[in-house]
Image: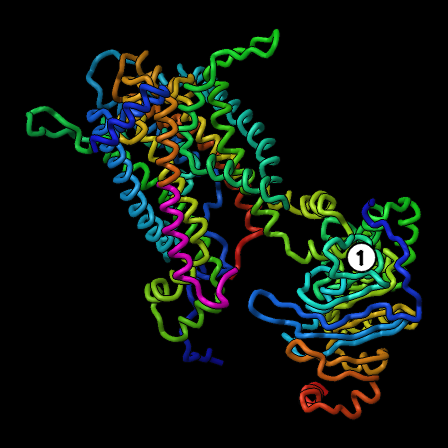
């Protein structure tokens, strides 16, 4: 560890490339904490939005007209408005009308933290897209397949879980991958509500150490790596789901 | 040399127009053509029949260099197709191809489909190409449909436009890849009539087909392929009346 | 004659079947009306919840500041037009590189596309704001680069990458038979691309392109984070100008949401209608 830090210090002295996150313990700690927050945001919002998408796609097939309408309103609202403003709406707007509670220091604290609102906002945002994606996958299944399941005596829920979802997943995996990649990139919006994710701490670091280009490059590399990881995982899943003769 | 430059090759009409010699073709590990040889003389109609997967479509695509092949030689009018420096335009001026899926350009009318290549590839004057396109469409009995888009035409009509499109290039030989397989039985006839007319006018044709009746009446020579080799061949009268190889007999008994 | 009861199950509800129309609200106006109603309601609720001091009603505040907010929104639209124009032109070139037959061109295009598609838009914006100079000297000309122009460039880059990807997808979706037929007729690679393949691609590219525009419009709000005076910053400034009243927050941001909704929803509907012609079927 000490050797690496010394090498980067040497790099700074000889070439001027200043990667404080490598040799300065305070910067390194902040940076790693920011990375952790971004990872947490990504994982929570991915899982949450997929769940929202599955439930929403299911509800869109409901018998009650009003259930379907409410889901449609939700989708159109969250798809046609900017995620940043959604986040502000949740964080500034909604939290101001929610009650506050006393924390351990005796200070009044909002019920949901900035991190919490970021997660909620992003989950609803990406969830709206996921509902549409899952629904397009469901629509791609020929009605004759569903009729065959009915004829065998499956209930609607059984058909959804055993027939519709497996087939629909294969169709919508590329679009889903796209949306989840977008979600990882959208976690940077949490910057605007002072959540200490990667971009926020990088901003702090480059303000202190005046090394904007280096931090930019590091940021871009890390996000490329994160996205690459997700895409690789989704592609592996796609390959595992492949069946001979099924699909393009 | 400019693209399409066509110097004489020393070919004379007594030599075969298309000479396929010991062609081997593999797609990765799978060998699809295992040493196929056949010759077609000027004015001859050769029919290739056989079960699916026997390599017929691949063979015909090798002839006009749509698909490269590993071993062997194909000479069209003396032009060697397996030449790494082959000028593909030069070859394709001599050989036209009609596909099973017609492959008309959907964003152009029938007339434009027929005129496009002569004007843009052969650089013929537009008025001349247009007049000829009208004549060709009339020849395949599509007078009045010149300004229709492929989407407005039936399968048989589209296939006839495709034939006219290839004829507009004035080829010396025509390749037909199962051109009636995607058509309704009623429209198959109109396409076969057009091909028969071509054959009677002396066009050299290589047909991959399932239409045994057509093969019997119009072909000069029938080739039966199975699993990448030519099993048997002969003039249609002998071939259909008395097939010698058991594989041929099995295939014909299934179809006829 | 009495009806015969057949011993079969009744068919599935229409909504789960493929041929059923998508469940959508028939009157598109209802969404907007609902949202507007929501804004008004929260405004009135906020009003009711404030202390009994002589302060202006929330609705009155919104009406008073509307001209400014609308101007700010217009600025967002302007940024979106410019970024879309730049991105489309550059993306078309990049897309041609992606389908090129020459390996080095394809590799370079792929690297650029992947890079700008995977980078978060906000990071690219920061990059442009910090790295582009205030002023560029081209010979005798000195062009100023205000923040919003840097934001336009920063937004145009991911648009470029996405347009390239859309073009590549469209070219690949053309049936290979078209390439075969064109080749058999002797067309050169360039002629095949420009005369036959690309004209067919344009129609297919329009729905994803429009979708991209909608996403871009919403991305223009990111410019507020890097200091451009768009409608989001203006909303914050309005709240500050009114004394920092917390009861204004929900109505104000609801109002901004409404503006974007009114602009983007019709675009989305049109895109969906065009998309249905090319729906995927297993």
Q: Position of residue C256 (x, y in %)?
A: 40, 26
- Nearer the observer, B152 or C19: B152
Q: What secondary structure do most residues of the magenta stretch adopt?
A: helix
**Judging from the image, what secondary structure is the residue with disc 1 in?**
helix
Q: Mark 1 points at which residue?
A: B92
Quadrant including the C terminus of chain B: bottom right
Q: Which stretch did the figure color magenta?
A: A226-248
The percent position of residue A22, horizontal first and vertical second, equals 27, 28
Q: Is residue B70 above or below residue A80?
A: below
Above or below A176: residue B195: below
Residue drawn 70% across and 57% down? Answer: C180
Percent coordinates x, y for residue A227 in the rendering? 38, 42
Given residues B126 and C69, the one toward you in this image is B126
Name the quadrant containing residue B68: bottom right
**The N terminus of chain B lies in quadrant:** top right
Q: Which residue occupies the foreground of this view, B244 or C248?
A: B244
**Residue A90 located left or right of residue C132:** left
Q: Would residue A74 be counted in the magenta stretch?
A: no
**Residue B155 appears in which quarter of the rendering?**
bottom right
* Location of residue A211 with respect to A121 vertically, above or below: above
* Residue B182 visible in this rendered orientation of the protein: no
Residue drawn at the location 50% of the way across and 38% of the way down: C111
Q: How crowded is mark 1: few (under 14 residues within 10 Å), some or many (20 or more)?
A: many
Q: Could you tell me residue A205's position as x and y percent? A: 28, 22
Chain ID at mark 1: B
Name the residue located 78 percent from the left edge and 75 percent from the top edge.
B38
- Examine the rendered structure and indicate whether residue C126 appears above or below residue B193: above
């Amino acid at each position: 560890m000490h050797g690496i830090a010394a090498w980067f210090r040497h790099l700074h002295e000889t070439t001027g490339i200043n990667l404080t996150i490598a040799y300065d313990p305070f910067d390194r700690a902040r940076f790693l904490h920011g990375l952790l927050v971004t990872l947490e945001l990504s994982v929570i919002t991915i899982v949450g939005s997929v769940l929202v998408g599955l439930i929403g796609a299911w509800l869109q097939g409901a018998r009650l007209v009003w259930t379907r309408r409410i889901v449609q309103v939700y989708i159109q609202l969250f798809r046609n408005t900017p995620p940043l403003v959604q986040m502000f709406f949740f964080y500034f707007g909604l939290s101001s009308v929610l009650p506050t509670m006393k924390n351990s220091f005796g200070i009044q604290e909002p019920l949901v933290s900035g991190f919490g609102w970021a997660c909620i906002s992003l989950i609803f945002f990406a969830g709206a897209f996921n509902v549409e994606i899952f629904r397009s996958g469901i629509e791609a299944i020929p009605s004759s397949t569903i009729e065959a399941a009915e004829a065998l005596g499956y209930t609607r829920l059984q058909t959804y879980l055993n027939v519709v979802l497996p087939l629909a997943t294969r169709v919508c995996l590329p679009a889903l991958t796209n949306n989840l990649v977008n979600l990882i990139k959208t976690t940077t919006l949490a910057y605007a509500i002072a959540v200490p994710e990667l971009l926020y701490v990088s901003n702090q670091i480059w303000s202190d150490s005046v090394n904007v280009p280096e931090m930019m490059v590091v940021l871009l590399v890390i996000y490329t790596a994160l996205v690459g990881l997700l895409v690789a995982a989704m592609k592996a899943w796609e390959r595992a789901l492949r069946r001979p003769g099924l699909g393009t | 040399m400019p693209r399409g430059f066509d110097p004489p090759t020393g070919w004379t009409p007594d030599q075969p127009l298309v000479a396929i010699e010991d062609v081997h073709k593999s797609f990765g590990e799978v060998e699809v053509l295992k040493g196929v040889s056949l010759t077609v003389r000027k004015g001859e109609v050769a029919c290739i029949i056989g079960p699916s997967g026997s390599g017929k479509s691949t063979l015909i695509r090798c002839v006009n260099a749509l698909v490269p092949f590993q071993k062997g030689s194909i000479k069209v009018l003396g032009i060697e197709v397996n030449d790494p420096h082959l000028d593909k335009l030069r070859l394709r001026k001599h050989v036209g191809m009609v596909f099973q899926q017609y492959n008309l350009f959907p964003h152009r009318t029938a007339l434009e489909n027929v005129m496009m290549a002569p004007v843009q590839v052969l650089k013929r004057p537009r008025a001349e190409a247009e007049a000829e396109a009208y004549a060709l469409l009339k020849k395949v009995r599509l007078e009045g449909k010149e300004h229709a888009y492929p989407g407005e035409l039936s399968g048989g009509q589209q296939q006839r436009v495709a034939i006219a499109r290839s004829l507009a290039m004035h080829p010396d030989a025509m390749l037909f890849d199962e051109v009636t397989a995607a058509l309704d039985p009623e429209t198959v006839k109109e396409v076969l009539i057009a091909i028969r007319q071509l054959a009677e006018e002396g066009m050299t044709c290589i047909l991959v087909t399932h239409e045994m009746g057509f093969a019997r009446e119009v072909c000069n020579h029938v080739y039966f392929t199975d699993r990448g080799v030519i099993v048997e061949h002969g003039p249609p009268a002998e071939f259909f009346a008395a097939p010698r190889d058991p594989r041929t007999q099995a295939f014909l008994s299934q179809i006829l | 004659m009495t009806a015969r009861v057949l011993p079969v199950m009744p068919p599935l509800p229409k909504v789960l079947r493929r041929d059923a129309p998508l469940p959508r609200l028939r009157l598109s106006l209802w969404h907007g009306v609902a949202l507007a109603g929501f804004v008004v309601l929260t405004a009135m609720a906020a009003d009711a919840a404030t202390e009994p001091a002589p302060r202006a009603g929330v609705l009155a505040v919104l009406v008073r500041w509307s001209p400014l907010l609308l101007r700010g929104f217009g600025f967002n639209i302007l940024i979106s037009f410019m970024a879309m124009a730049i991105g489309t032109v550059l993306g078309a070139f990049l897309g041609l590189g992606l389908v090129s037959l020459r390996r080095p061109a394809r590799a370079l295009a792929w690297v650029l596309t992947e890079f700008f598609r995977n980078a978060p838009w906000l990071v690219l914006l920061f990059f442009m704001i910090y790295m582009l100079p205030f002023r560029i000297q081209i010979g005798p000309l000195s062009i100023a680069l205000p923040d919003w122009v840097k934001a336009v460039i920063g937004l145009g880059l991911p648009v470029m990458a996405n347009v390239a990807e859309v073009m590549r997808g469209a070219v690949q979706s053309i049936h290979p038979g078209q390439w075969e037929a064109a080749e058999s007729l002797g067309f050169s690679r360039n002629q095949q691309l420009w005369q036959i393949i690309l004209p067919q691609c344009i129609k297919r590219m329009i729905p994803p392109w429009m979708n991209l525009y909608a996403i871009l419009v919403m991305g223009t709000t990111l410019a507020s984070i890097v200091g451009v005076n768009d409608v989001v910053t203006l909303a914050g400034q309005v709240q500050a100008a009114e004394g920092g009243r917390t009861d204004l927050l929900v109505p104000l941001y609801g109002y901004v949401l409404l503006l974007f909704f009114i602009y983007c929803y019709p675009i989305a509907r049109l895109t969906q209608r065009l998309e249905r012609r090319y729906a995927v079927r297993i």
